Amino acid sequence: MKNWKSWIGFLISLIILYLAFHRIDFRLLWASLEGANYFYIIPIVAIIFLTMALRSLRWGYLLRPIKKIGFFNLFEGMLIGFMANNVLPVRMGEFVRAYIIGRSERISKSASLGTVMVERLFDGFTVLGVLVVVLTFIHFPPGNLGFKKGILMGGYITIAIYGFAFAVLIIIKTQTRWALKTALFFTRPFSSKLAKSGISSIKSFKEGLLSVDSPKTMVITFLYSLVIWAAFAYSIYLIGFAFGLKFSISAAVTVLLAICLAMMIPSTPGYVGPYHASVAYALVLYNIPLEKALSLSLVFHATNYIPITLAGFLYLWRHHLSLKKIREEEKKAEQKP
């Protein structure tokens, strides 16, 4: 039962894949894949690595109050983290990324994780901002009411999740003593080691929130977030050309929102299932045949998945580490008094 979350994610992915693919004509799907112009994958991969570079620069700004870290170390950590998200369950890549940079730069891993959480909040609120703009100014094509309701419901759930996370970070930052007492109250009955570890982690985690004190850093981080997601939307626009489609701005942004909201659904590593279904049904909204939409989703997911995963494993190898070794070292650290 230790891996029950992984099994739930696998089951959800399997159900979504079945619902997306069980009624399609696989001959049309294959014909669409055969007829695609895969030349467009080259600029899309370039954009993917550009967004990784921008994410690394953004992370560096958030880490500056703790330590100024070189770009290439941040870039390696970013790629390893995203690779880990692609192959490990329950978004373990965020912890792996914090571990890698903490290990290589000799800073607290909890403090590093604090900056990762702030970074994710910026991503979340930027996407929510895009959602508000889309719902206010962009009109979806008629029909497919269920998909539109799903987008809206996903937005509400995302607001709740990110709002809760934001509140927790604010409490840790402004009401540290209360947060420590609460952590001690809930962990002490189970283990004194767990209580000490929890208190130490909260103190270090607070250190990772120092960047929130700088308005300049906040503005720069927000601008980076806008550029990152605009670049991702442009990569969606480009993949349309590979399949003979010219997306409107609203179509590209709708697909972006669908992907982001689908990634909130528990699934297998790499978001297999929800990712494909979200892209496909967002495109069906714009009268694109389901077979072509699914073929596009398969190629776009693979284009985002394979290069990052390979690069992440390469950099992990350069650190003379493996994901198994990282998990073993983390367990040993947790067992220390």
Image: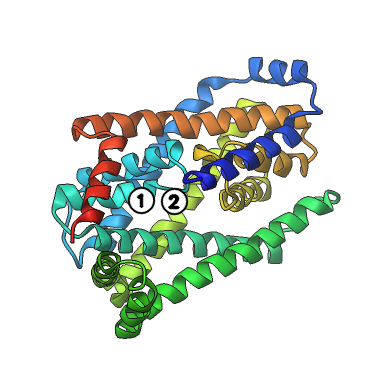
Query: Please, what is the three-letter code of the amino acid marked with disc 2?
Result: Ile
> Residue 122 at x, y = what percent?
44, 63
Tag 1 residue = 55
First in sequence: mark 2 vs mark 1 = 1
Query: 220 and 180: which one is in front?
Result: 180
Looking at the rendered structure, the secondary structure element under dot 1 is helix
| Tag shown at residue 88 | none
Residue 121 is left or right of residue 233, and the answer is left
Q: Is residue 47 visible?
A: no
Tag 2 residue = 228
Rendered position, 158 above or below 294: below
How many residues crowd around disc 2 within 10 Å: few (fewer than 14), some, or many (20 or more)?
many
Q: Quadrant of residue 113?
A: bottom left
Query: Please, what is the three-letter code of the amino acid marked with disc 1?
Result: Arg
Rendered position, 116 above or below 263: below
Of discs 2 and 1, which sits in the foreground?
A: 1
